[in-house]
Image (cartoon, grey):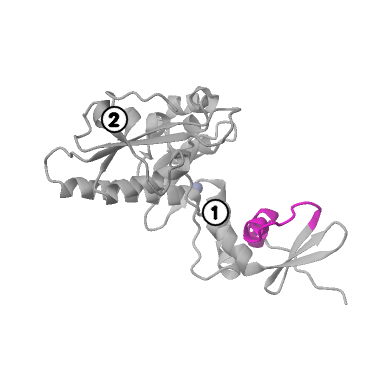
Amino acid sequence: MKQIYTELNPAQQLIYTASNIGRAYKGFDYSDIAGIYKRDQYCVLVRSDGSEEVYKASLVQDAYLKFSTRLVDYFHCLGPNYRGPSLWKDGAYVLLKGSHYAHSYGANTELAKAQRKWIDKFIYLDREPLIALLENEQFNLGHLVVPGEKPWCSCGSFQKQLKNVKELKEETFPEFQPSCIHLVWYQTFLKFREQQAALLSSLGNGRPMKCAAWWYSPMVQGGPTTNGNLQILYTDKGHLAPLDQWSLYRDPKDLRNYTQHDLWNYLFKMINAGYVSFCGATALPQIKLKSN
Ligand SMILES: [Zn+2]
């Protein structure tokens, strides 16, 4: 008997992709895919030779939701000079693409130059021209993010979810709300800022003595790894202490070199250990670390 397939609607097309099936099922074979369909609670994949495979729709949905709201590394949404979100107006922020930190020559790219040219001028633009500039495919500077009650982002991923929100709710769960990596990054950045402010106020008016600082050198193009090098130093003598009064931080349970993927984790760990943290490159001019 011939099997009945359902063509995917636009919401299902976002979810049931080869990439998301691959995220849900380790070892998935990406080659020779003729089509992807839906049948009941299954995602049906047809190969070029006509054979079919079935995957649980719920697992592919989970993979899609997890991936579209994953926490990307700290440098992914960081502007020039380690600048975080730039307030535009009405509670909306510009998050720039972390092009300065993508690799060791990141700051010399056209994109990075354009970011430096524009970063202090966004406030002079109205909403539509601003979004057109940020999302312009040639520049692709970053995104406009509106956190808060009704979160919103100008990025393609969020806009596709927003456009298909009714079908996505039907396909996943009724409470589904559009989100994206930029909103998740912003919320995490805000949480860090709030926890750091709470730590500072708990210390009273005096200058904090327990301080930690981090430095980052991006991956070297053509080098052996796609990871950059993150170094964390700490002191009990205040952030103005000279270099010889700082110690290199090493977690005894985690002695590998730290990378861009570790910074979020360690920012929160520093606070939990009672250490006020600083971006070494911008806040501690008395200390010059050699990269690597
Ligand atoms: Zn976004």
| Range covered by the magenta-colored residues | 10-34
Q: Pointer 1: residues within 10 angstroms few (<14), some, or many (20+)?
A: some
Q: Amino acid at mark 2?
A: Ala
* Label whose residue precedes the other's in the sequence (2 or 1): 1
Direction bottom: furthest residue: 1
Comparing labels 2 and 1, the label whose residue is closer to the camera: 2
Q: Is residue 1 magenta?
A: no
| Residue 24 is covered by the magenta coloring | yes
Quadrant where the N terminus is found in the figure: bottom right
Mark 2 sits on what residue? 283
Query: Which type of secondary structure does the marked residue at label 2 adopt?
Result: helix
Report x, y in % for residue 118: 44, 28
* Residue linked to disc 1: 68
Element carrying mark 1: helix
The answer as to whether callout 1 falls within 8 Å of ligand 1 is no
Residue sitting at x 24%, y 39%:
211
What is the quadrant of residue 54 in the picture? bottom right
Taking the image as shown, residue 103 lies to the left or right of residue 117, namely right
Asked which quadrant contains residue 230, the reply is: top left
Residue sitting at x 53%, y 28%: 111
Q: Is residue 95 left or right of residue 38?
A: left
- In the image, is 187 to the left or to the right of 67? left
CA gap between label 2 and label 1 equals 33 Å
